[in-house]
Amino acid sequence: MVGCFFAIAANISEAFGYESWIEEFGLADSNAKQKYLASIYWAAVTISTVGYGDIVPTNAIEMTVGLGLIFSGVAFYSYIVSKLSNLFSTVKENKIITREEIVTDFAGKQRFTEHLTKRVQYFFKTNRTDNSSLIF
C-alpha cells in the first residue's frame, strides 16, 4: 500500500505539471510494472528505515506523501516495540511456583490429611533435582 501511495503521489505531481520521482529516476518511458516495482522498492527501503536515497521525492506533493508514510512507519514500529516490550515484561512477571506450593494446592484439592500432605512435602524437599521450581 505504501508503494501505491508513493506512485499515486507521482501521478498527482505529473497531473499538476511537476517533475516526479518517476522522471527523475528514468522510468518515464517504462511500463506500469517497472514503476510499481520501483515504488515498492522505495517503500520497503524507506519504511524499513534503511533509506538508500536512490529514489527520492522531487516535489512538495511527493515529499508530503513521503513524510506521512514515514511517520506512519514510525508509529507502526513504535506500536510493535511497545507490544513486544509489554509481552516480555509480563513474561518476567509470571509467577514461579515451587513444588511445595504445587503439592499443597494438589493436597488441598484432593483432601489429603495434614499428615499425608507433610509427608509428601518432605519427600519433595529431600529428593530435589535441579528443576526444583516450575514456571507458569
Image (spheres, rainbow, N blue to C red):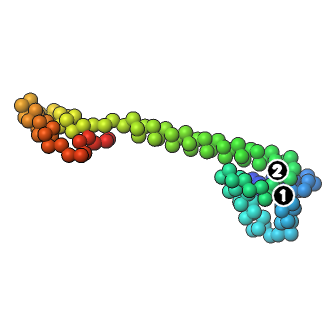
Q: Residue furthest top?
A: 114
Amino acid type of disc 1?
Answer: Trp
- Secondary structure, mark 1, is helix
Q: Nearer the viewer, residue 90 or 122?
A: 122
Residue 112 pos. (x, y %): 10, 34
Residue that numbered label 2 is attached to: 62
Residue that numbered label 1 is attached to: 21
Residue at horizontal 73 percent and vertical 64 percent from the top: 37
Residue at horizontal 78 percent and vertical 64 percent from the top: 35
Residue 135 pos. (x, y %): 31, 41
Q: Nearer the viewer, residue 69 or 55?
A: 55
Label 1 neighbourhood size at 10 Å, few (<14), some (14-19), many (20+)? many
Distance Cα–Cα, label 1 vs label 2: 8 Å
**Residue 105 position by quadrant:** top left
CB contact under 8 Å: marks 1 and 2: yes
**Residue 45 position by quadrant:** bottom right
Label 2 neighbourhood size at 10 Å, few (<14), some (14-19), many (20+)? many
- Describe residue 83's horizontal placement relative to residue 8 as left or right: left
- Residue 11 in sight: no
Q: Nearer the viewer, residue 18 or 83?
A: 83
- Residue 86 in sight: yes
Amino acid type of disc 2?
Answer: Glu
- Describe residue 65's horizontal placement relative to residue 110 as left or right: right
Q: Quadrant of the C terminus?
A: top left
**Relative to 94, is 37 above or below?**
below
